[in-house]
Image (cartoon, rainbow, N blue to C red):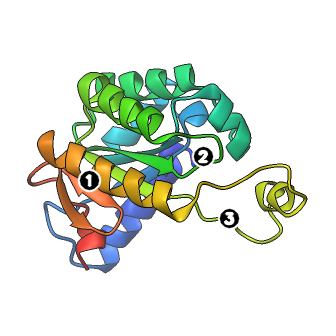
């Protein structure tokens, strides 16, 4: 993680060299385990960062292990709480669907928890893509893990889009859903 002072210097340098809009969206991405310190998040907000994106991926510890993620579901929830306490009112959560052993009902329950309890303004819901040479792809190659089939993946995507629409999230880009007025500007480009 960049120290807030460094983030501030970068943003000051950009503002000095470019004509930035007064309402520019300044996003910062972080993993939950590195965004737990309230002081850090307060200082980050002071630099002008006004949108925080957390790579939650899942709120199931077993699925997080499958993905090789270093954080726990509890840490992810605490990171969201810390971000809110630090004053971030434009929060994105990255979530992944189509993880081996993840079921459609489980994915929808996770979305319900996120919407009802964490209440992010924006959700990036990515279908899992296995990259060649990654541990999970190597495990799949050896037959140690089976990916969900196309029919299940289709249901997961469509059910999530329908549910999020019912919750007031607009599906404005392939993997992105937001409350009105919180579409990520770089996704709009």
Foreground tag (1 vs 2)? 1
Compared with 167, 14 (above or below) is below
Question: Furthest-right residue in view?
Answer: 142
Asked if residue 48 can be seen in this view, the reply is no
Badge 1 crowding class, 10 Å Cα cut-off, few under 14, some 14 to 19, many 20 or more, is some
| The one of 120 and 132 positioned closer to us in this rendering | 132
Write down the residue under mark 2. 1
Identify residue for label 3: 130
Q: Check residue 161 in the rendering and tell me which mark sits there, or answer none.
A: 1
- Residue 115 shows up from this direction: yes
> Element under label 2?
loop
Question: Residue 105, relative to residue 183: is it above or below?
Answer: above
Q: CA distance from mark 1 to mark 3?
A: 22 Å
Circle 1: element type: helix
Task: In the rendered view, tell whether residue 4 sits above or below residue 170.
Answer: above
> What is the x, y in percent for residue 124?
37, 54
In the rendered image, residue 73, in percent from the top left (x then y), is placed at: 55, 25
Asked if residue 16 lies left or right of residue 28, the reply is left
Residue 188: image x %, image y %?
23, 74
Task: Please tell me in which quadrant of the rendered image residue 164 appears.
Answer: top left
| First in residue order: circle 1 vs circle 2 | 2
Closer-to-camera residue (154/96)? 154
Residue at 21% over, 50% down: 162
Which residue is drawn at the image coordinates 64% and 40% (left, top)? Answer: 101
Q: Nearer the viewer, residue 160 or 119?
A: 160
């Amino acid at each position: 993680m960049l120290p807030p002072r460094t983030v501030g210097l970068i943003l000051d340098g950009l503002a000095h060299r470019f004509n930035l809009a007064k309402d520019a969206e300044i996003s910062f991405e972080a993993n939950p385990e590195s965004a737990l310190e309230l002081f850090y998040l307060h200082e980050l907000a002071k630099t002008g960062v006004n949108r925080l994106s957390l790579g939650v991926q899942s709120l199931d510890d077993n699925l997080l292990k499958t993905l090789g993620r270093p954080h726990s579901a509890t840490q992810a929830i605490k990171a969201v709480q810390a971000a809110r306490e630090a004053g971030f009112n434009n929060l994105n959560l990255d979530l992944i669907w189509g993880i081996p052993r993840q079921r459609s009902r489980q994915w929808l329950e996770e979305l319900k928890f996120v919407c009802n309890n964490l209440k992010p303004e924006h959700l990036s819901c990515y279908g899992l893509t296995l990259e060649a040479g990654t541990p999970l792809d190597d495990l799949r190659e050896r037959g140690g893990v089976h990916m969900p089939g196309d029919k299940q993946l289709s249901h997961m995507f469509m059910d999530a889009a329908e549910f999020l629409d019912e919750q007031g999230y607009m599906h404005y880009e392939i993997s992105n859903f937001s409350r009105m007025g919180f579409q990520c500007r770089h996704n709009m480009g």
